[in-house]
Image (tube, grey):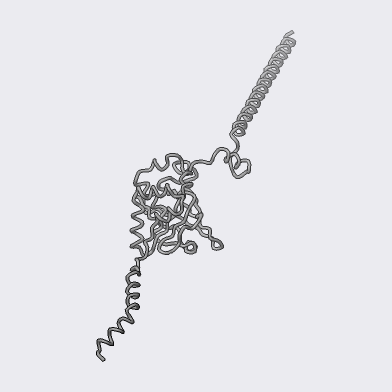
Amino acid sequence: MDSHTVVIPLLLLFLPFLLAAAADDVAAPAPSPPGKLNLTSILESGGQYSTLLRLLQTTKIAEQLANQLENSYDGLTFFAPNDAAFTKLKPGALNGLSDQQKIQLLLYHVLPRYYSVTTFQMASNPLPTEASGPGGMYSVNVTASTTSHLVNMSTGVVDVPISSTMMAKFPLAVYSVDDVLLPVQLFGGGASSSHKAGVAPAPAGQQAAARRKGGGGGVPKSDVAAEPSAAGEEEAEDDDGTKAAAACREMMSAGWTTLASLALVAAVNLVGA
């Protein structure tokens, strides 16, 4: 039998299988590269970070952090203030910052390495942030409980706890916070620092409620004003009484002196007689 006569039927027999394999190869997509970590997408999916997103875009910090993530061996940790956090700032606090200060404020929310909640428990304070100025690197103190997942940041101006974890997978950790982290270098320190340019004071109703609860608050203004007035009246009465007593003593002393003089004159007259 001719060899060609044998080969051709065999080819026809396996032809459907060859065509199916070729079709599978064409239909199968090429493996796609792993997706890039995108801080902007993470915040957008959160749905309550419009102010933060606007600042990240206008300052170009979003692009900077994306580039860092591609070339970083230590990863990044980002604290994301939500929209409610920015409403706690005094009116005009953000507009009062220069472009450079806005960049410093945003970078103050970035730690130059990846921290999980567990890693915070072993961290040594102060932790450097990505913000810096003429005085050097801006830092923050972080405390974590070994018995729970509570993590708190202290800036010297405000204390801010982590409210939720948006993402924590190396090389990026993103934590949501309900307050803006205010560095001392931009907003000052001390007990009154929150009233300088950062956090707006609590409403008067809340302050009065705190005073009624006895939480270390001050005395109501009306009470403070009344006390010095009453004390002043008492002091005035005491002064008047003291002056009257002194006048009586002076009058009595003058009277005795006069009587003594008259008695002496009478005695002299009697001797002369």
Residue 232 in the image: state x and y as whole percent: 61, 28
Quadrant of the rendering where the N terminus is positioned: bottom left
For the point 60% across and 32% down, which residue is it?
A: 222
Name the image quarter holding residue 214.
top right
Rendering coords of residue 269 (x, y %): 72, 9
Q: Tell me the residue at 44%/54% (across/down).
A: 45
Q: How many marks can you see?
A: 0
Query: Image height check: is 229 above or below 63?
Result: above
Q: Is residue 260 left or right of residue 66?
A: right
Q: Nearer the viewer, residue 74 or 33?
A: 33
Quarter-of-image position of residue 74? bottom left
User: x%, y% of residue 20?
Assistant: 35, 75
Q: Position of residue 177 (x, y in %)?
A: 48, 52
Furthest residue to the bottom? 1
In the rendered image, the vertical position of residue 21 relative to residue 70, given as above or below: below
Indicate the quadrant where residue 234 lies.
top right
Q: Quadrant of the C terminus?
A: top right
Query: Is 53 on the left or on the right of 227, as rendered?
Result: left
Q: Residue at x 25, y 86 (%)?
A: 4
In the depicted structure, whether residue 105 falls above or below residue 172: above
Q: Could you tell me which residue is drawn at 39 percent across and 41 percent down? A: 95
Q: Camera-side residue: 238 or 193?
A: 193
Q: Which is nearer the eye, 74 or 137? A: 74
